Image (cartoon, rainbow, N blue to C red):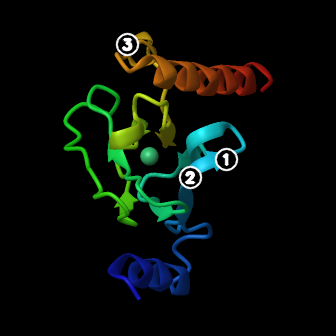
Amino acid sequence: MTMRAKIAAALLALGLTTAPAFAETIEVKMLNRGENGSMVFEPDYVELKPGDRVKFRVGHKSHNAASIDGMVPADYAGFKGQINEEIEVSFDTPGFYGIKCSPHFAMGMVMLIKVGEAELTEAFRKAEVPGRARGRFDAIFARIDQAKAAQ
Ligand SMILES: [Cu+2]
């Protein structure tokens, strides 16, 4: 058991909390081809609680997962997996995180992660990315805006 799980279990035993927010791990696949076309992360958008983790799985070879400079919370150090590396990344700071596959960034292989409460800023929406990545991010932003408008 991790220290966090032990603490949560202890609090639960003491009746100090009724709804412990256990951290979860969400899997994202790196694929040559998926529902949204070629060179994709699937799913291309996930919402996390602070402390949740994403495991980037090798669906097809020759991909990696890396954070995009300029599309992460201020002061975030960033991460970069090796090609074909299945990395698990923990996301603690609320905000939006743009993720790319380094060799296929120009082909639009990107995804977006939201952690906790966060708003899409104009600066984030307009961050400089290659054209095909721009199209995919704009499609994700549109889905987020639609979901918000429907609330
Ligand atoms: Cu790739």
Circle 2 Cα neighbour tier, 10 Å, few/some/many (<14 / 14–19 / ≥20): many
User: Residue 31 shows which numbered tag?
Assistant: 2
Image point 33% across, 41% down: which residue?
Answer: 102
- Say which amino acid is labelled 2: Leu
- Say which amino acid is labelled 1: Gly
Query: Image quarter for residue 139?
Result: top right
Image point 52% across, 69% down: which residue?
Answer: 22
Specify whether 127 is left or right of 59.
left
CA–CA distance between discs 2 and 3? 29 Å
Q: Can residue 94 be seen in the rendering of this structure?
A: no
Q: Earlier in the sequence, mark 2 or mark 3?
A: 2
Q: Quadrant of the C terminus?
A: top right
Q: Position of residue 116 (x, y in %)?
A: 49, 43
User: Residue 123 shows which numbered tag?
Assistant: 3
* Beta carbon of the mark 1 residue lies under 8 A of ligand 1: no
Q: Position of residue 94 (x, y in %)?
A: 40, 40
- Say which amino acid is labelled 3: Ala
CA–CA distance between discs 3 and 1? 29 Å
Residue behind mark 1: 34
